[in-house]
């Protein structure tokens, strides 16, 4: 696994609005959703709260890769790609429960491990 480059970490700290999470099903059909409950965990993982996943949950449990796209307040786009895992207990799940809004169910924590990162079309890692 790779860690998030410093400039991506700074961009993440300055991201605006919801982010887009894309997964792929077993027939290679993509599914993209907006997510708002997402946090950085360590220097190589982004954790997304599963509040209302359906297709996304099925795709993750089937072992797909994922991509997360976000934009900064200045309008610069960044993308992070990698393996995504699903946790219904343990440290990642407990951490998600601490920051996820209590108005949402927080069924699980989806953890995207950084394998590649991009600033626009430029590959960083």
Image: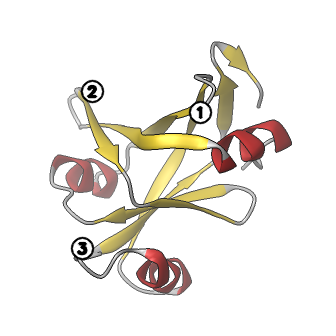
**Numbered circles on residues, count:** 3
Residue at image x 47%, y 53%?
Answer: 84
Q: Is residue 14 left or right of residue 103?
A: right
Label 3: which secondary element = loop
Indicate how the structure is coloured in the image.
Answer: secondary structure
31 vs 124, left or right, is left
Q: Residue at x 23, y 37 (%)?
A: 26
Q: Which mark is residue 28?
A: 2
Return the x and y of residue 48 as percentages of the image width and height.
43, 60
In the drawing, what numbered circle is on residue 104?
3
User: In the image, is residue 107 above or below residue 63?
Assistant: below
> Where does the image place residue 85, in percent across and percent down from the top left?
45, 61
Above or below for 29 versus 80: above
Q: Which residue is outermost to the left?
A: 54
Pick the front one: 122 or 18: 18
Q: Nearer the viewer, residue 109 or 77?
A: 77
Crowding at mark 2 (Cα within 10 Å: few <14, some 14-19, many 20+): few
> Can you name the residue that lies furthest to the right here?
6
Residue 97, image x and y in percent?
A: 41, 82
Residue occupied by mark 1? 73
Q: Earlier in the sequence, mark 1 or mark 3?
A: 1
SS for callout 1:
loop
What residue lies at 59% left-to-right and 33% top-to-bottom? 73
Residue furthest to the top in view is: 121
The image quadrant of residue 34 is top left
Name the residue rendered at 27%, 47% in the picture: 59
Judge the density around disc 1: few (<14), some (14-19), many (≥20) Cα neighbours within 10 Å: few
Question: Which of the image's four quarters has the C terminus?
Answer: top right
Q: CA distance from mark 3 to mark 2?
A: 29 Å
Between marks 1 and 2, how big is the CA–CA gap? 32 Å
């Amino acid at each position: 696994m790779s860690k998030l480059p410093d400039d991506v970490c700074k961009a993440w700290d300055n991201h605006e609005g919801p982010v887009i999470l894309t997964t792929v099903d077993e027939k290679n059909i993509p599914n993209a959703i907006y997510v708002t409950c997402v946090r950085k965990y360590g220097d190589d993982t982004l954790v997304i709260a599963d509040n209302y996943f359906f297709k996304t949950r099925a795709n993750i449990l089937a072992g797909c890769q994922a991509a997360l796209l976000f934009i900064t307040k200045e309008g610069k786009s960044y993308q992070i790609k990698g393996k995504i895992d699903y946790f219904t207990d343990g440290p990642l799940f407990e951490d998600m429960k601490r920051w996820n809004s209590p108005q949402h169910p927080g069924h699980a924590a989806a953890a995207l491990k950084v394998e590649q990162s991009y600033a626009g079309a430029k590959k960083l890692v």
